[in-house]
């Protein structure tokens, strides 16, 4: 342990009590021997009130008793990481590694010192520089690097430091969502793990990707759309805007997510919601398995087909319909049965959904849907669908309305709302409009 006489705080902000931090700073100096130990400056971030010093430390010290394996909340969620994954194949990181091996001195590494922890130096920002410095040190390069060291952070301050420290290399909105949700509590993560949308002890993805775990945005959107659908009664379906909603990403507490939690205070214990989560997790697995060749142990077909359940539009639409049918067990069972073996080799008919991205493909899709429903004795058909994307105006397909009229629907029905050409919810909603008990969702799907 370093005594007070072994270091000196030359500058300290007037409203800081040195004695409150002297023991931690003494321990830090004793372990890391910073170049500035004879003239340290103790400062405070006036926005967050977080206290820190800036100094230079040898690479051997930084990497030897420092770590990037850092949790945002060490007490409530210690097993879940605050940092994003290192992008090892990024060109900027490759250059960083080369620079480090040639003796580059890095700065702007941000850390928290926690006396008594092993290791005590928690790298909050600059994990790529940390890895480059570690590799260079293994090759014999041991020089000082600039580190901003915080002391005695609380969770709010730690989150603030995480966010500002990750703006040098663009941080994904998914990572921000994960950080915010971790600070809010473990409920959403626990719910996803319980339903099978995340594996046990698995965390949300920190960036979007087909093969990545579910993101916070996806999980929030699923829950929000379930409750949006549940709020729509069967008598109101024809007159209500049934367009699913996506929860904004990168915000501390998006409005739709905040409203959903406030309006449904028991959502984490909602058995029907849990059943919907488990059913969708089963559908995701079934969709992946449908394209897995056991003989070759490889996946077949376009990657987008097997990952179709990762499509946000499909996820939101499926959850919306699950909410709509929550009190209709017969039809809900058929909605959940999409994942059952023997129903279809491709549970979501990804080829059919893909064909709906273009006017000609959509026209073919609608003809086949109509033929299927007509064969079941159903006279209802969606009429006057607007094709477009929220926020991008409405793009109308020439002759679509005439096409629908020409299909011979005796009781055409106009549904308000926007349905994009690639919007799988169109199919789910056509299933809802079939008021007879023998077709639900994609339970009776047209075949190409």
Image: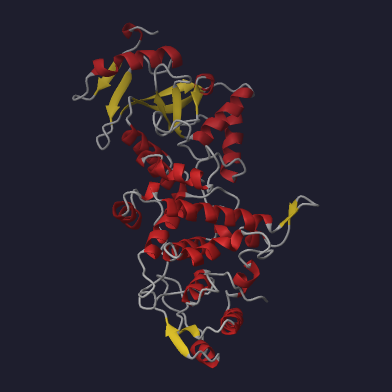
The x and y percentages for residue 143 are 53, 22
Task: Tell me if 215 is positioned left or right of 18 in this view.
Answer: right
Seen as rendered, the residue at the extreme right is 295
Question: What is the tally of numbered marks visible in this picture?
Answer: 0
Q: Residue at x 38, y 8 (%)?
A: 2
Whether residue 206 is visible to the viewer of this picture, yes or no, is no
Q: What kind of colouring is applied to the model shown?
A: secondary structure
Q: Nearer the viewer, residue 70 or 213?
A: 213
Let me know if residue 363 appears in the view.
yes
Task: In the rendered view, tell whether residue 236 sits above or below residue 148.
Answer: below
Residue at 52% from the left image edge and 90% from the top image edge:
399
Residue 367, compared with residue 109, is above or below; it is below
Q: Quadrant of residue 326?
A: bottom left
Closer-to-camera residue (74/86): 74
* Quarter of the figure that contains the N terminus: top left
Residue at 36% over, 70% down: 233
Q: Residue 422 at x, y = what percent?
A: 54, 71
Residue 289, position as x, y percentages in the image: 68, 55
Quadrant of residue 240 within the rendered picture: bottom left
Split into 4 quadrants, where in the image is the C terminus?
bottom right
Residue sitting nearer the eye, 3 or 258:
258
Tell me what residue is drawn at x 25 percent, y 15 percent.
Answer: 19
433 on left or right of 210: left
Left-right relation of 365 to 40: right
Q: Position of residue 50 (x, y in %)?
A: 29, 30
**Can you tell which quarter of the image residue 140 is in?**
top right
């Amino acid at each position: 342990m370093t005594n007070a006489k072994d270091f000196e705080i030359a500058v300290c902000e007037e409203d800081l009590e040195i004695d409150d931090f002297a023991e931690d700073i003494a321990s830090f100096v004793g372990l890391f021997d910073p170049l500035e130990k004879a003239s340290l400056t103790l400062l405070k971030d006036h926005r967050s009130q977080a206290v820190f010093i800036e100094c230079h430390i040898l690479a051997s010290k930084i990497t030897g008793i420092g770590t990037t394996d850092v949790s945002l909340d060490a007490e409530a969620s210690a097993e879940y990481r605050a940092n994003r994954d290192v992008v090892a194949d990024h060109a900027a990181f490759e250059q960083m590694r080369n620079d480090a091996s040639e003796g580059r001195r890095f700065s702007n590494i941000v850390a928290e010192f926690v006396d008594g922890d092993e290791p005590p130096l928690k790298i909050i920002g600059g994990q790529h520089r940390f890895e480059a410095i570690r590799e260079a040190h293994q090759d014999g390069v041991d020089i000082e690097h600039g580190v901003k060291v915080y002391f005695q952070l609380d969770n709010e301050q730690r989150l603030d430091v995480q966010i500002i420290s990750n703006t040098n290399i663009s941080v994904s909105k998914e990572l921000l969502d994960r950080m915010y949700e971790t600070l809010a509590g473990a409920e959403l993560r626990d719910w996803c793990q319980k339903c099978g949308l995340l594996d046990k002890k698995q965390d949300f993805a920190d960036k979007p990707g087909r093969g990545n775990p579910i993101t916070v945005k996806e999980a929030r959107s699923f829950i929000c759309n379930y409750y949006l659908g549940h709020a729509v009664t069967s008598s109101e379906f024809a007159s209500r805007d049934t367009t699913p909603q996506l929860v904004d990403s990168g915000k501390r507490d998006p409005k739709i997510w905040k409203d959903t939690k406030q309006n449904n205070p028991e959502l984490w214990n909602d058995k029907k919601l849990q059943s919907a989560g488990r059913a969708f997790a089963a559908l995701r697995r079934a969709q992946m398995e449908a394209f897995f060749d056991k003989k070759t142990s490889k996946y077949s077909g376009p990657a987008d087909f097997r990952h179709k359940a990762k499509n946000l539009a499909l996820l939101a639409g499926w959850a919306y319909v699950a909410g709509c049918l929550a009190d209709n067990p017969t039809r809900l069972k058929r909605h959940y049965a999409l994942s059952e073996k023997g129903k279809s080799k491709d549970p979501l008919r990804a080829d059919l959904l893909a064909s709906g991205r273009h006017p000609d493909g959509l026209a073919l899709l609608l003809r086949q849907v109509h033929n299927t429903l007509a064969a079941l004795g159903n006279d209802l058909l969606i009429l006057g669908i607007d094709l477009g994307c929220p926020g991008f105006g409405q793009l109308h397909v020439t002759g679509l309305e005439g096409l629908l009229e020409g299909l011979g629907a005796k009781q055409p029905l106009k549904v308000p709302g926007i349905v994009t050409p690639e919007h799988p919810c169109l199919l789910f909603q056509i299933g809802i409009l079939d008021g007879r008990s023998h077709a639900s969702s994609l339970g009776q799907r047209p075949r190409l």
